Image (cartoon, helix red, strand yellow):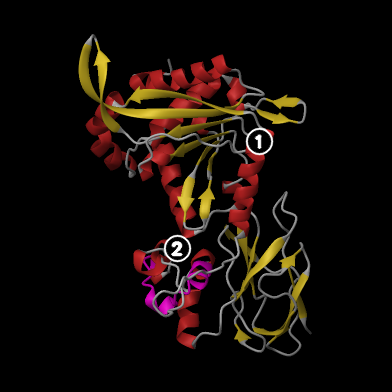
Amino acid sequence: MSIEIKVPVLPESVADATIATWHKKVGEMIEQDENLVDIETDKVVLEVVAPESGMLEKIIKNTGDTVLAEEVIAVFKPMKAGSAPAPSAPEVKPQAAAPAAVAAAATPAASAQNTQAAGPAARRLMSEQDVSPENVKGSGKGGRITTQDVSAPQASMVQLPVLAAGERLEKRVPMTRLRTRIAERLLSAQQNAAILTTFNEVNMQPVMDLRNRYKDQFEKVHGVKLGFMSFFTKAATEALKRFPVVNASIDGKDIVYHGYFDVGVAVSSPRGLVVPILRDVDKMNMAQIEKAIHDLGVKAREGTLGIDEITGGTFTISNGGVFGSLLSTPILNPPQTGILGMHKIEQRPVVENNQIVIRPMMYLAFSYDHRLIDGSESVRFLVTIKELLEDPARLLLDI
């Protein structure tokens, strides 16, 4: 008896999804739990696997089609006659959102096997960039291909057809659902919020001295490197406690004050910007923050973030300094009303005690929704972060 393959229940607030990639063909023999199709939403990619061994009888929805929750997309036939049908809703494995795949031509069996050794995000990235899995060396566990492997310089260049000299080349690629969603949210933030940005600068010497003094011992004890993000996360959280309005959000004509601190850390991945969330960060120590940031960063790059790891959040920190940015104005992540921008640490002359000295300085930018946060509050909020970073012992003493 045939089984209907349906779109799984979609994440909250997601109205529809897109068929990203069919990994199996009609008539192809399939083992139980093998991935049949990737379905991409605005936030995550859902892997729909075979409910048991058998084959696809019919594919109803093709790559690129828009589908709704529990909509029938294929018909599956169990391999053994008379076997009991599995539930119509197959097992779902959530993965982080990734570019929608361009429909790919059939590949040799060896390529198909290599593709199965890659995650859904890596598979779509290879398809979009016309990269053969045989030409990518996997660095993940068991030789699994990650998005970083696909994004290596030799693989990440957009492949254009070879034409005669003098030809002006173009390649049109559909915008992915994630990129489309990012564009919509950023445009909405600009149109619907009164965004202002205030700036300050922080002397990073005290943090750098403390880090250099204890980084080896910290890593030995906790098994993770001591970076700058834990200092900024701790400082921002303390500042949020002192200025609850920055941790609030606007819902219609109401102000929602959050009694918890879920801080998002913006991460650039091969699929676009994602913001994993550190839950209840006020209850975490420095080591826990560093471990959480490291683990979420790895998941973001490999495309394995779950829906619960990228939804919610009451405040966001964005670090453009890792790319060399000296100064920028970050855009709000609605419905949040504040975002902190970190930047490049640069040796600059400053005046201390009437003397010109060289110090490692960083510009800080705090963008906020002026509908809710007054200018004086925004300035004092950012000054609080500056003061805590320039005297980091206060973070540990909670003063």
Q: Nearer the viewer, residue 232 or 358?
A: 358
- Disc 2 marks a residue whose amino acid type is Thr
Three-letter amino acid code at disc 1? Pro
**Residue under pointer 1:** 335
Which quarter of the rendering shows the N terminus? bottom right
Q: Which residue is mark 2?
A: 147
- The answer to whether residue 395 is seen in the rendering is no
Magenta part of the chain: 124-141
Vertical placement of residue 252 versus 309, above or below: above
Nearer to us in this view, 135 or 330: 330
Residue 361 or residue 212, whichever sits in front: 361
Give the residue at x 59% y 77%.
23
The answer to whether residue 318 is left or right of residue 393 is: right
In the picture, measured across the screen, residue 94 lies left or right of residue 395, that is right
Quarter holding the C terminus? top left
The residue under the point 59% across, 81% down is 31
The percent coordinates of residue 188 (x first, y second) are: 67, 41
Mark 1 or mark 2, which is nearer the start of the sequence? Answer: 2
Relative vertical location of residue 359 with respect to residue 268 in this rendering, above or below: above
Q: Confirm whether residue 152 shows in the render.
A: yes
Per the model, the C-alpha gap separating discs 2 and 1 is 30 Å
